[in-house]
Amino acid sequence: MNIYDISKKAGVSIATVSRVINGSSNVSEKTKAKVLAVIEEVGYTPNAFARGLGLNTMQTVGILCADSSDPYMANAISVLEKELRVYGYNIFLCCTGYDLEAKQQSLQFLVNKQVDALIFIGSNFINEDQKDNEYIKNVAKSIPVMIINGLLSSENIYSILADDYTAVYDATKAFIENGRKRIVYLHNNLTYSIRQKIRGYEKAMNEYSLAAHTVLIEYTQKSIKEVKEQLLNVHELIKDADVIMCANDTIAVGVLKYAKEKGLRIPTDVEILGHNNSYITLCTDPELSSIDNQLEELCKSCVSTLMGVFNGDTVPLRLVFPSVLVQRQTTSLPK
Amino acid sequence: MNIYDISKKAGVSIATVSRVINGSSNVSEKTKAKVLAVIEEVGYTPNAFARGLGLNTMQTVGILCADSSDPYMANAISVLEKELRVYGYNIFLCCTGYDLEAKQQSLQFLVNKQVDALIFIGSNFINEDQKDNEYIKNVAKSIPVMIINGLLSSENIYSILADDYTAVYDATKAFIENGRKRIVYLHNNLTYSIRQKIRGYEKAMNEYSLAAHTVLIEYTQKSIKEVKEQLLNVHELIKDADVIMCANDTIAVGVLKYAKEKGLRIPTDVEILGHNNSYITLCTDPELSSIDNQLEELCKSCVSTLMGVFNGDTVPLRLVFPSVLVQRQTTSLPK
DNA sequence: TTTAAATTTGGAAACGTTTACATATTGATT
DNA sequence: AATCAATATGTAAACGTTTCCAAATTTAAA
């Protein structure tokens, strides 16, 4: 069942049918009604591939992230999908894991599907490896590339960033000014986003001439147990700390559990701060304080920026949103 | 840059170029090498739309779920995507929310993109509404439809199910046989999957002539606070219960927090059992016991079944996997 | 060598749309 | 009623592949 069948049944040309389908204005009410009636009757839907071939777009956007089961990314995907659909775009989702090669392959995979744009969630993708970046830049020659919480300065590449640097700096400073001295920072890797957080932490510590302690916690997918095991290696650091700041909530939950098991009272003996303000902050006891990087805002802004790019508007290459501290029960800063 | 450009540069016909691209055997090593060299040199990739038009497939599968930020569905998406990519398929993701109309629209959206198959996650989609089901059945006339944890008996519709009925029945029975009498079942809606769970619970209760109490807990997206508020309405039920079984982990976390706030000791005063064995079971204190419905298994099986369908194999319309009880700290059944 | 068979190649149609351009129709103005 | 402009419709080319069929080339056998 194709456009010819419809045109025959309706007694018009295929051009007219096409015009009706696409809502062109240059078609009389009478014929429009006739054609629509036929389309309805036979349940015709235009072939997307032929359409794509003619229009050179199928209204799709590729989304790349390391792991869609990570609550943070899952949330981003959810918001992006919803927003994009408003504009008639469907998403291709590719989760690449944390391996560089798979990353490249996935990117190729999506580009081959003729997506209209690419959205990266998180900066796992954008690292110092020059070749990798060149490849992305190359893709950006043909389609716009959006990066949520990652930075790559190049033409047609747009970064939508949370100002985690300032948020962590402010939080650290607040702890210091309220008398905490031994503040530790735990993180899990060195993506752009996490380097910013660490920078903020170290800046504040340096300003007050306090020793900065950053610790890399390596863990596979969402394993709180692994986090706890790693913490054994830095037990004395944890034990003596006034505050433990974490680059994400999963680490913070691990710390929380570890501290409780070791008999530390929270927040009396030690305060704990997470990052991302994800769902799990509400599951722990006491409930976890966290820095909210306004992911939903970032995602919405990402989509509206992208639509601006599609429209040929001039849009900023970099958008930065403030992150905010959400205090719950694991910290006791004065409000 | 298209196939003509390549054919000209390589001094062969477009048919030959096409054959090289598609790895056809009927092409000499010499010309194959020549063509591949040109393709490599100019960085050509075939146009997916034209390809789709010719082959009538673009190797895509549509995935429909209510909310991809739900950890349960996020996990399923992650596994499905990874598995499908092994076979060269990309996924279109559509999150429809819980509204019937949006559901229909999303379905149409995906079908219009000429996907090769449709996968539903969860049974939110498949309800008693006849018209709704008819629509899905209609889609199934042209492409295979897979339903994970949902049931719809019809040609070309394949259900991959967790045997939650038996798991809940067994768990309830185990509680009863170990002396618990007042067992309450909390759930959030009446999808196919949840009706099965309730059936299992009620069956066991009836067998031992105990009064079954099922309570509907309505909450919006992942709101533990809302769960707790709703629990106030059934306070005396909670207070007097020996065991509170929940249809998912989010409700269970809400119950856990509620019970702790009311001064109940867990599992001494009341035992709590979740369902889905999701990540958050590890975040609470005490850690949550839960029924694991082996989602990863279901998803993997879904994909392999689908590939069977694509190959024209005869595959079963219904596959059922056992769910297993994972005991942690909120229950104290003997092992 | 010659012939037949097998392999490799090319020409051209098909896939189902959109759209520039040409033509036909309608409506308004004189 | 004649003319012109505006609107509606149709024709045909284009989009970039795949693949059937026929033709050309190579290989093997006689």
Image (tube, coloured by chain):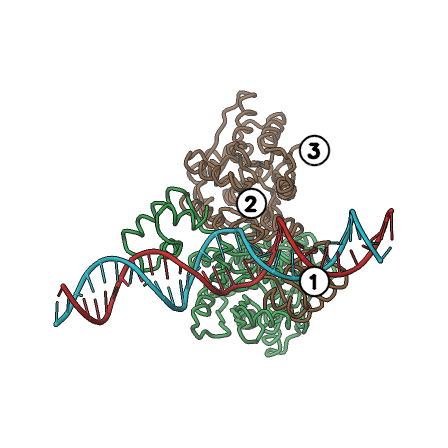
Chain colours: A green, B brown, C cyan, D red
Q: Position of residue B205 (x, y in %)?
A: 54, 25
Q: Position of residue B319 (x, y in %)?
A: 62, 34
**Disc 3 + disc 2, Cβ < 8 Å:** no
D27 left or right of B131 in image:
right
Residue under label 3: B335
Horizontal and vertical percent for residue A114? 55, 61
Q: Name the residue type under label 1.
A: Glu
Between B320 and B23, the residue placed more toward the observer is: B23
| Relative height, residue B151 to residue B299 (above, below) | above
Comparing B128 with A269, the one in front is: B128
| Alpha carbon distance from label 1 to label 3 | 45 Å
Where is A207 relative to D24, above or below?
Answer: below
Q: CA distance from mark 3 to mark 2?
A: 43 Å
> For mark 1, what is the residue?
A101
Amino acid type at image mark 2: Ala
For the residues marked 1 and 2, what is the alpha-carbon distance in whole angstroms?
A: 28 Å
x%, y% of residue B157?
55, 36
Q: Which residue in the structure is indicated by mark 2?
A: B117
Chain letter for the residue marked with disc 2 in the picture: B
- The reply to the same-chain question for discs 1 and 3 is no
Chain for mark 1? A
